[in-house]
Structures are given as structure tokens and as C-alpha cells.
Amino acid sequence: MAIAAAEVNVETASELFKNWQGHRRLTRRVIEAFPKDKLFQFSIGGMRPFAEMAWEFIRMAVPIVEGVSTGKWEEWNQSKGQKPTTKSELLRLWDEQTAELDAKFPEIPPHRFNEVDKAFGQWENKGIATIQYAIDNEIHHRGQGYVYLRALGIEPPPFWER
């Protein structure tokens, strides 16, 4: 692969965050598309129900932003917080976290995007790569949600409408 003589920045921190929040809006619509009785129980091929995947996103996003911002990483605890048991609780937590991300992401000092940390004692990378991991993880699992919705005979939201 040839590299251009002059490197260019292709995305600012605010553009990255806007992109992430676009993905989060789409994931919220996927959660909304699930029937209440299927969100927490339906699965295919041994995969987790979509509510479990959404709960994972909730438990990761703010701690990742806080860790990238400060360089202080608590061990990621799979069971941290009160796990929602209803669709309305899951959406309420999603919305609360969205507001928290809106407040915290802009506080990340610019230099922290390029500093290397070992996030949650597991993933060593630059801050920007750790944030991208959270986005990629959400996209990957949202794809599983699309498969579930189609298997249930439900048309998922258009993936390009973020």
C-alpha cells in the first residue's frame, strides 16, 4: 500500500464523536424495533440476546471515555451496575448514558487520543483506537441484532440512517 507523501488528518475529535453518536442513535432504534418479549430472550446459534449486547455497550462507553480522558482505568466488571430487565429500563439507561457522553467526551484532552494505555487492564492501545474499538464492537453486535430482527420477520432500521 502506497502512503501519500503528505499525511492528512481525516477526522477531528468532534467528528469522531458525531460519528459515534450517530451509531448510538441507530443502535437505539434497533433496540426499539425489538418486541418486548424478544429483546431479552431471542437468540440464534448460541449468540446472546440483543439486550445483553446493548447492556455491554452501556457498560463500556462512559468508562472508555473516562479512561481515555484521565488515563485511569478501573478493571472492567462484566456485572457493573443494575442490569435492566425491561425494554423501557434499557432505553432509559441508554438515554442517560448518551447525555453523559455528550458532557464527558468534549473534556478529553487532545493529547490523550494519542497516548497509549492498557484499557481495563486488557487492551493496550492509543486512546483513539480504544474509542474506535467501542464503536466497532457496537457495529458488530448491532449486525447480530439485524439478523435477529430479520429472523423475527421485522425490517430493521436502514443502517445508513444514523
Image (cartoon, grey):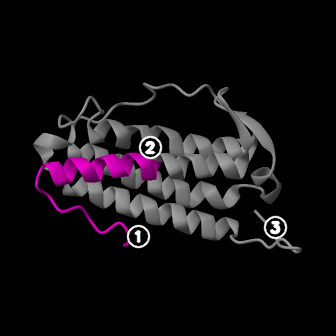
Asked if disc 2 and disc 1 are in contact, CB closer than 8 Å, the reply is: no
Q: Which of 80 and 151 is in front in this view?
A: 151
Badge 1 element: loop
Spatial CA span between label 1 and label 3: 31 Å
Could you say where residue 44 lies in the image, as x and y percent from the top left? 22, 36
Q: Which of 1 and 35 is in front in this view?
A: 1
* Part of the protein shown in magenta: 138-162
Residue mark closest to the camera, 1 vs 3: 3
Q: Nearer the viewer, residue 58 or 46?
A: 46
| Residue 85 appearing in the image | yes
Instruction: Describe residue 105's horizontal placement relative to residue 31 as left or right.
Output: right
Spatial CA span between label 2 and label 1: 17 Å
Residue of label 3: 3
Q: Which of 80 and 37 is in front in this view?
A: 37
Residue of label 1: 162
Callout 1 amino acid: Arg
- Graded by Cα atoms within 10 Å as few (under 14), some (14 to 19) or many (20 or more), the crowding at tag 3 reads few
Callout 2 amino acid: Phe
Residue mark closest to the camera, 2 vs 3: 3
Residue of label 2: 57
- Graded by Cα atoms within 10 Å as few (under 14), some (14 to 19) or many (20 or more), the crowding at tag 2 reads some
**Is 25 above or below relative to 140?**
below
Choose the circle earlier in sequence order: 2 or 1. 2
